[in-house]
Amino acid sequence: MRSLTKPAGCVPKIARTHPRCRDARSASVSVGGACPDRVGVLSSLLSFAFQSKIPSGSGLSTLNLPIPPDRKTVNSSDRESRLALVLFGGKRQTFGMSSGTIQLVQEAGSPYLPYRRALLSSAQIKELSTPKPWRAIVDAVICWAWIVAAMSLVAMRTSWWTVLIAIPVIGNRYYALFIIAHDGMHRRLFPTIKRNDFWTDVLALGPVGAITHINNRNHLTHHRHLATLEDPDRHKHACFNKADRPELLEFLSGFGSVWSSAKAVFLTRGRENLQKAPAGPTASSYTPRDLVILASWFAVLAGGLTWFIGWWAYPVLWLFPVYAFMFLGDNFRSFAEHSHPEGDQAADRHRLITYASNPLERMLVAPMNMNYHTAHHLWPSIPYYNLPTADRLMRQHPAAAGLEWRGSYFAYLLTYWSALPIAECKQAR
Ligand SMILES: [Zn+2]
């Protein structure tokens, strides 16, 4: 671990912002700011291991890095520690990042965070992050058109083969809707939170009993604590529960994760992670508006399917397709996009992976551009329809060579399967 000692002459104002004035658990590093020995800080933080260009911007840009006090022993009781790396924007400048900085960030469990500022300029991030509400609405309406068409097909001609056609269409198009709703959970569909949450709940989350302002906490905590023990989705991509082939099959079937996921999202609603979740307008109790949306969707789906098709239609044409194609698809995607066939301690150092994939895989496993997952994690403000552009731009930067792109989800699954059993994974539990 790094050793930071208090230099002489630390006044309270500086002590809040200077690493050598703070203890090792909570430091705020101001690079180029009002620091008594900023040259020393610069030289210690920014040197040679990671060459990177900081693009133009205006004013100061701040990159907040969470720093667990001890990478190997981090646990949920540890208080939050943060490092704010403040960089001057303005004139384009070149800097190198020292191995000491990389070590510091790796200790934080967030080795990818420096990429956030290096790979796209502030102007590019701002432009790509501008929401286009009409785009999400159109995509959502098209998804619902497919779902209604599939249900109507069964209603007009109830037969085993129409049911077999309808199930994947309904499940997969709901998965696409869920990915649109994922942007809603990040409050990126509409410019205002009220409108964003309303349309996310009405168009996509209400049908599966979820409400944005309640159920987004689990996901936002995942973003904040990826590659640490505090990530509530760790069970999806860590290898401790996929150390051999029976365990991997159990996970992929959903039996090994459906309870953990449902508990985190619906029962605890992120309460366990309240202190770890990013600050924001979230709540843990339902409002009358939420209950109306949930009850309306249940009445429309359960009542409508039962009325027009039969008593079996709600479980067969809604619950099962959502489980088989949305839940299991998202489960597999989350695993593939954050995992490696190696022990978790090593995998925690590089858990951001993008898949080029192919159209069939993208439709089944990662609809609505979720295969560009590294770009999403680096800049969650960029809506799903702009992720391909973000990915193309970040690939052009030399520093992107440190990130990982894979060709195929199922090829990776085969690679992981072939590597099992993994001894380090069993030792970790
Ligand atoms: Zn996300």
Image: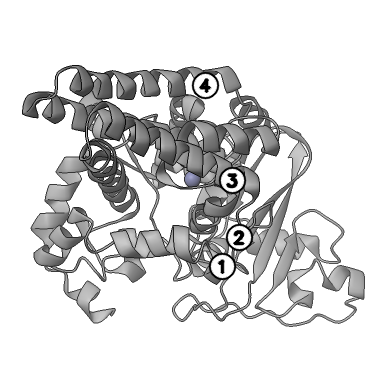
Look at label 2 and name its amino acid.
Answer: Ser
Residue that badge 2 annotates: 284
The Cα–Cα distance between marks 4 and 2, rounded to whole angstroms, is 27 Å
The Cα–Cα distance between marks 3 and 4, rounded to whole angstroms, is 20 Å
Tell me the residue at 46%/67% (across/down).
228
Q: Judge from the rendering whether residue 81 lies leftward or rightward of residue 22; answer left or right.
A: left
The answer as to whether callout 3 falls within 8 Å of ligand 1 is no
- Can you say whether 411 is above or below 144 in the image? below
Residue that badge 3 annotates: 290
* Mark 4–mark 2 CB contact (< 8 Å): no
Circle 2 SS class = loop
Q: Indicate which disc, 1 or 3, sits on the residue closer to the N terminus.
A: 1
For the N terminus, which image quadrant?
bottom right
Give the numbered dot on residue 137. 4
Q: Which mark lies nearer to you, 3 or 2? A: 3
Residue that badge 1 annotates: 271
The Cα–Cα distance between marks 4 and 1, rounded to whole angstroms, is 31 Å
Look at label 1 and name its amino acid.
Answer: Arg
**10 Å crowding of disc 4: few (<14), some (14-19), many (20+):** some
Q: Indicate which disc, 1 or 2, sits on the residue closer to the N terminus.
A: 1
Q: x, y percentage for residue 300?
A: 41, 33
Look at label 4 and name its amino acid.
Answer: Ile
For the C terminus, which image quadrant?
bottom left
- Can you say whether 348 is above or below 154 in the image? below
- Can you say whether 159 is above or below 253 in the image? above
